[in-house]
Image (tube, helix red, strand yellow):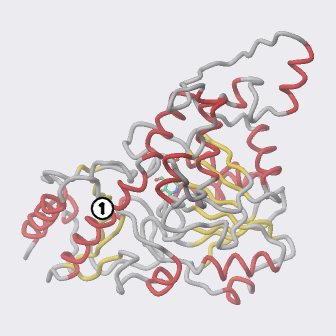
Amino acid sequence: MPTDPPGAPRADTLLAAAGRRPEWTHGLVNPPVARGSTVVYASVAEMEEAARAPDSRLYYGRRGTQTAWALAEALTALEPGAEGTMLFPSGVAAIATAILATCRPGAHLLVPDSAYEPTAAFVFGFGRDHGLTAEAYDPLLDGAGIARLFRPETALLLLESPGSLSFEVQDVPALAAAARAAGIPTLLDNSWAASWFFKGIPAGCDMVMQSLTKYVAGHSDLLMGAVSATPALLPRLRRAAHALGQCVSADDAALALRGYRTLGVRLRHQQESALAIARALAGHPLVARVLHPALPSCPGHATFLRDFSGSSGLFGFELTLDGPDLAARFCDPMHHFRLGFSWGGYESLIIPARAARRLPQPPRGARFRVSIGLEDPADLLADLEAALARVAP
Ligand SMILES: Cc1ncc(COP(=O)(O)O)c(C=O)c1O
């Protein structure tokens, strides 16, 4: 029977297929969990051959085995235009390495005011100790605004969109274009969109990081980070990753790859539930503002509508009330939400947002962040409505 020639795979098809090279899977559906430090060679010639392609031939455990290579290749497929992906034992390790790959002592780098706290801590603390000068900027700046902050020694523009606690959506294409025009590389923390609802490399970024701990892993049972980079930046990133000994275990890579296969269905469910809950909260008299990029009340909403194909399950909301014990009264007896940092798993989480860090825009009342999981949204909404009833004056 004649068949049409296959076109480029659509997004979900890509999730099912990426990284499954026959030479890595050896007839199985998935690449085996190939654990190992030492590789033994049959000859000196074979050893020398492996040294020439250490990221796709067995060379030494730190350079990975087929389990990690398959995951890296699958992640590269999520960012068209990326040359490759390096894996790290956490998202924080990924960010730190990408910064060190681009910034030498004396360098200036720009970081959004809304950045994830450990990112800010790295650039303003450890980075300063090692000769870097970091400067915070308003995440809602446009291209001309960011260009005014560039200095001759600016070596990196960090982006995080939306901010993972305050949810401002950045104009990534404009900011990345301004940086590229000035010869400054960009690093986008794309964890919220999981390189699924937003693609950073096509938007003009040079390096796109995501904490795989969140949506790709999806089950809150591992820590891992990834940076996908353009052909121009990948050699610098790889050099820094190797110099710092960054690597991941085959067991964790296999788990992350398992999560990757179901990323699309999970994100669609989480998107739908989160939107339903966010809209319901927006209509509640005790909720002053919902910080969900898909709702008009979120700073940068117009940019979200222009650039994103959808929204994930993490958002914030502010109450009309506050008080010293309000967070405890609101959160402590939750039934379906658990109190916990991180996000992106199948289980719903809540945190009082001010517990985590400084916010660029002071909240109007008590602020909370929720990560919506795979539970029935009606149960989750009932949990939040009960919490609102508890704190009602
Ligand atoms: C936006 C953002 N980036 C990076 C990270 C760090 O990821 P990891 O926990 O994998 O180190 C987090 C973790 O919460 C995060 O929220």
In the picture as drawn, the residue positioned furthest to the bottom comes out as: 144
Give the vertical position of 300 relative to 382 (above or below): below
Q: Position of residue 130 (x, y in %)?
A: 77, 52
187 or 358: which is nearer to us? 187
| Foreground residue among 29 and 349 | 29
- Indicate the position of residue 361 as horizontal and vertical percent values: 44, 79
Which quadrant of the figure contains the C terminus? Answer: bottom left
Total labels: the figure holds 1
Name, please, the residue furthest toward the front.
1
* Disc 1 element: strand
Would the CB of label 1 be found within 8 Å of ligand 1?
no
Q: Nearer the viewer, residue 111 or 354?
A: 111
Q: Residues within 10 Å of mark 1 (few under 14, many from 20)?
A: many
Could you tell me which residue is drawn at 55 percent across and 83 percent down?
Answer: 140
Q: Position of residue 113 (x, y in %)?
A: 55, 72
Q: Residue at x 15, y 54 (%)?
A: 334
Q: Quadrant of residue 242?
A: top right
Question: What amino acid is labelled 1 in the image?
Answer: Val
120 relative position to 43: left or right = left
User: Quadrant of residue 279 in the image?
Assistant: bottom left
Residue at horizontal 44 percent and vertical 50 percent from the top: 214
Vertically, is 102 above or below 247? below
Q: Which residue is mark 1?
A: 370
> Furthest-top residue in view?
42
Residue 21 x/y as whole percent: 63, 37
Q: Nearer the viewer, residue 25 or 232?
A: 25
